Amino acid sequence: MSATTQALSTAEHLVDAPLLYKGKVRELYDLGEHFLIVVTDRISAFDYILDPAIPYKGDVLNSLSAYWFEQTADLLENHVIHTDVDQLGSIAKDPEALRRRIMVTRKAERIDIECVVRGYITGGGWRQYETSGAVNGIELPAGLRKNSPLPEPIFTPAAKNDVGHDEDIPFEKMEELVGAALSAELKNKSLALYAYARKVCAEQGIILADCKFEFGLIDGKVILIDEIFTPDSSRFWAEDKYALDIEIDSMDKEPVRTYLSGTDWDKNSAPDPLPDHVVQETSRRYLGIYERLTGQSLISIS
């Protein structure tokens, strides 16, 4: 059976509840007292949703978030109520299609800051450093090479935009937007979460190069929301593939990036459907990072 036949591109026909928001991957439904988050298998590149969806991607993102939310609960409270589709009752029109994909959460007021922690100079941070010697206004030592570990992790926030890309901002701008006290709290919590996960990942032979968090407020208290330490919100490198001055094959949707970079796609119109071998390999990549981080197999595909 082709992996593409099992992918879930939308859950709107599977949930008997009002749809509040449809993002690139997640769909948010209103259960009254709580939210229902359904994680689909959709995959995007350069702001385009690609076709077809990636089988089991949603299973991995949701299950991995649930794993990390549990692991970090002593560090910071989060929004999770449960991830058991059977507790949804008649709200789930097809429980098996939604299994491993749902998260019922408390309703929090989202703080419109993406909290990014970087332990290595790579990606967009490297591009900033090449130009200015700084990242989000943070001056860094001269002579760093691409993928170098930073002397210490840095906090580089971005202002969230529901349309288009989030905007990298200096910490001082974040203080203007949400206040100095809340900014300091988010920075400290983000750095503590990164330090914890970096150590856990290292024990599994994985480098956590950088990651991002979203936070919300319930009765004025900061909690973790959205997702945490997934291949879509973090940059994972296998230690045995780490090197300086190259594009490291990260443990996420790299097969899709590699394929698209080898085509003549102009990034201004929807690309052609992904070949089945790229879909299959990307699916294996997501399942593989889940197994390495948790020590458990989620699903096996041939």
Image (spheres, helix red, strand yellow):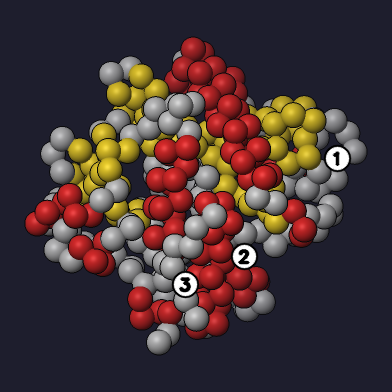
Q: Secondary structure at mark 1?
A: loop
Q: Which mark is residue 254?
A: 2
Cβ atoms under marks 1 and 2 closer than 8 Å:
no
Mark 1 vs mark 3, foreground winner is 3
Across and down, in percent, residue 99 comes to 28, 60
Q: In the current view of this chain or complex, which residue is farthest to the left?
A: 90
Q: Secondary structure at mark 3?
A: loop
In the rendered image, which residue does mark 3 sit on?
300
Q: Residue at x 13, y 39 (%)?
A: 32
In the rendered image, which residue does mark 1 sit on?
144
Residue 215 versus residue 195: which sits nearer the camera?
195
Distance from the alpha carbon under mark 3 to that under mark 2: 20 Å
Across and down, in percent, residue 142 comes to 88, 34
Give, as a three-letter code, the residue at label 3: Ser
- Residue 167: image quadrant is top right
Q: Residue at x 58, y 42 (%)?
A: 211
